[in-house]
């Protein structure tokens, strides 16, 4: 399997955002991974239709397509994999649903849950909140680069993707702490020029 991309663009599920437009711009600028993430209240039908459009774009650009939470949508659109957290299917069940070859991400905030997720079949970990963010409500306190690094150190060989409040300027300290890559919503979706923002992030994550 090809190595996981280091920059994950997550679609912005907030009302009024041009999620598809920002995603298309990010892909055209070279983003290697897109995670489809829709609002909890979005119907499966709309989630499927949106994910199918993103999947087409990722195929056009040779990028990896992951689907957050809704693994049935991931399977239905032929995505490369999915991402699960505490409110979603357990990692071992998600692995059974997606099959052995799929990319499977799991949200983790500490060393013990990270080790368990890897043992249960996660192929990468989403670790955060790295910093505070206004994009998602109800998150615990920020881990900071050191907290992200502590999780990464617990699972050598498993890519850790830092998430929340990530900007190009913060990528260096996250990488230095042990993060393999980063996932962003606002840094691309809220940028005046999402393609330029993607290029800046890509330059920062590229070893
Ligand atoms: C790369 C990455 N890391 C963490 C998350 C968060 O997933 P989760 O905790 O399940 O929260 P929701 O995104 O479902 O609100 C993620 N999506 N991606
Ligand atoms: C989905 C998710 N899970 C933890 S933080 C977050 C959103 C991150 O968004 P941003 O990159 O704008 O801080
Ligand atoms: Mg989730």
Image (cartoon, grey):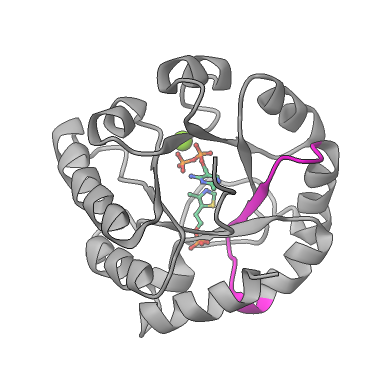
Residue drawn at x 30%, y 69% as measured from the top left: 22
Q: Is residue 120 above or below residue 133?
A: above
Residue 15, image x, y percentages:
25, 59
Q: Is residue 45 left or right of residue 159?
A: left
Camera-nearest residue between 61 and 146: 61
Extreme-front residue of the structure: 1
Quadrant location of the C terminus?
A: bottom right
The spot of residue 45 in percent (x, y) is 14, 34
Q: Nearer the viewer, residue 141 or 1?
A: 1
Q: Quadrant of residue 107?
A: top right
User: What residue range appears in magenta?
Assistant: 155-169
Q: Residue at image x 68%, y 46%?
A: 159
Which part of the image, by quadrant, shows the N terminus? top right
Q: Residue at x 64, y 69 (%)?
A: 205
Magenta highlight on residue 157: yes
Towards the viewer: 85 or 50: 50
Image location (x, y in percent) of residue 184:
50, 62
Image coords of residue 166 (percent x, y)? 59, 66
Q: Residue at the spot x=77%, y=37% of the render?
A: 110
Q: Main secondary structure of the magenta part?
A: loop
On screen, residue 34 above or below 103: below
Asked if residue 22 lies left or right of residue 131, the reply is: left
Residue 108 is covered by the magenta coloring: no
């Amino acid at each position: 399997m090809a190595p996981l991309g280091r920059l994950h663009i997550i679609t912005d599920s907030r009302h009024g955002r041009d999620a598809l437009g920002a995603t298309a711009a990010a892909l055209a600028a070279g983003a290697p991974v897109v995670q489809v993430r829709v609002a909890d209240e979005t119907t499966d039908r709309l989630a499927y239709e949106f994910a199918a459009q993103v999947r087409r774009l990722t195929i056009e650009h040779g990028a990896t397509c992951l689907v957050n939470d809704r693994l049935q949508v991931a399977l239905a659109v032929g995505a490369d994999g999915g991402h699960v957290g505490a409110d979603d299917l357990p990692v071992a069940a998600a692995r059974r649903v997606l099959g052995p070859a799929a990319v499977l991400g799991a949200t983790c905030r500490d060393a013990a849950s990270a080790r368990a997720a890897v043992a249960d079949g996660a192929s990468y970990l989403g670790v955060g909140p790295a910093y505070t963010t206004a994009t998602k409500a109800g998150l615990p306190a920020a881990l900071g680069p050191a907290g992200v690094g502590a999780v990464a150190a617990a699972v050598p060989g498993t890519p850790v993707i830092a998430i929340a409040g990530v900007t190009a300027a913060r990528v260096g300290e996250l990488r230095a702490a042990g993060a393999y890559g980063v996932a962003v919503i606002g840094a691309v979706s809220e940028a005046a020029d999402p393609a330029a923002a993607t290029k800046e992030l890509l330059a920062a994550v590229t070893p």
